[in-house]
Amino acid sequence: MPQLDVSALSDALRKFRPVSVRAYTGQGERRIAVPDRHRKWAQVTETVTSLHAHRVELVDATGSTLHVVDTGGELAESPTLARQQDTGSDVAALARAIVSGQQVALDSHVEASKHLVQALLKQQELSNKRLEVLEKLLVQQMQLTHDLSAALVDQRIETADAAAAAVAARANPADDDKMSKLLEMAAPLIGQAMLPAASTAPAT
């Protein structure tokens, strides 16, 4: 019957540090506790070798099989470890699926955010254009108000000038000159009319 590779068994014991081993021989299974003393791995190896075991399972504190050393000397995974690894693979696959889903959701959110930002920028651009139009209209309105005010002032000035000219025309010095000439022409007549009255006055 093929024998276990002692070197492989010793390396496995030091690597995985089990609390016990299960040795399978032609007479059946035998459980060997790992002693807590110096050269414990060497003693376990010697015990397994003396039993001519063709298979050794390394067991942890919970009773689960960590690894298996077969007659070929190869380290083979135990069914328990295989199940653990399968479970780990399932968990890893689930984690990858979750991460992938989160990435898809994040990408969708980023894409939606891009559209929202673009819409906001477009709205801001339209608002800016409206403000520019309103500003131009306000400037035009202010200019029109200024022009109307200036025209009203000019009209009032013209009206005042016309009124002043009318007043000046009514008080024209030429009319005074005509009145003076009439008085000059009437003066001799007035003098002649006053002479008889002077001759008939009693002497003093």
Image (tube, helix red, strand yellow):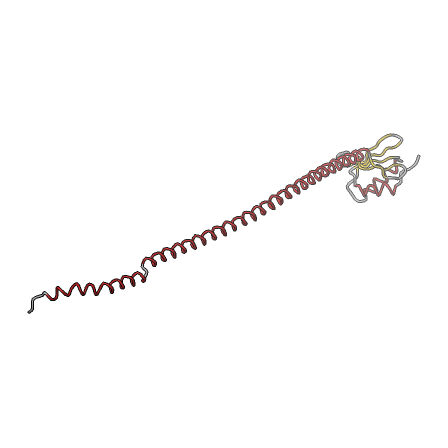
Residue found at the very far bottom of the displayed protein: 204
Query: Can you give x and y, in whole percent of width and height, for residue 2 in the image?
Result: 92, 36
User: Depth check: 94 or 72 in front?
Assistant: 94
Query: Can you give x and y, in whole percent of width and height, for residue 139 in the image?
Result: 52, 51
Please give the name of the residue rendered at 86% of the width and 30% of the height, measured from the top-left corner: 28
> Residue 114 vs residue 33: left or right?
left
User: Depth check: 169 or 58 in front?
Assistant: 169
> Residue 25 vs residue 111: left or right?
right
Give residue 13's quadrant in the image: top right
Query: Can you give x and y, in whole percent of width and height, for residue 70 in the image?
Result: 87, 36
Does residue 55 sit above or below 148 in this rendering? Answer: above
User: Depth check: 204 or 151 in front?
Assistant: 204
> Residue 114 vs residue 151: left or right?
right
Give residue 21's quadrant in the image: top right
Which quadrant of the figure contains the N terminus?
top right
Please give the name of the residue rendered at 32% of the width and 62% of the height, measured from the top-left corner: 174
User: Depth check: 30 or 120 in front?
Assistant: 120
Residue found at the very far top of the displayed protein: 27
Please give the name of the residue rendered at 54% of the width and 50% of the height, measured from the top-left corner: 136
Q: How many numbered marks have been drawn onto this rendered protein structure?
A: 0
Please give the name of the residue rendered at 66% of the width and 40% of the height, measured from the top-left corner: 112
Give residue 46's quadrant in the image: top right
Which quadrant of the figure contains the C terminus?
bottom left
Query: Can you give x and y, in whole percent of width and height, for residue 155 in the image?
Result: 42, 53
Residue found at the very far left of the displayed protein: 204
Does residue 196 sit above or below 121 in this rendering? Answer: below
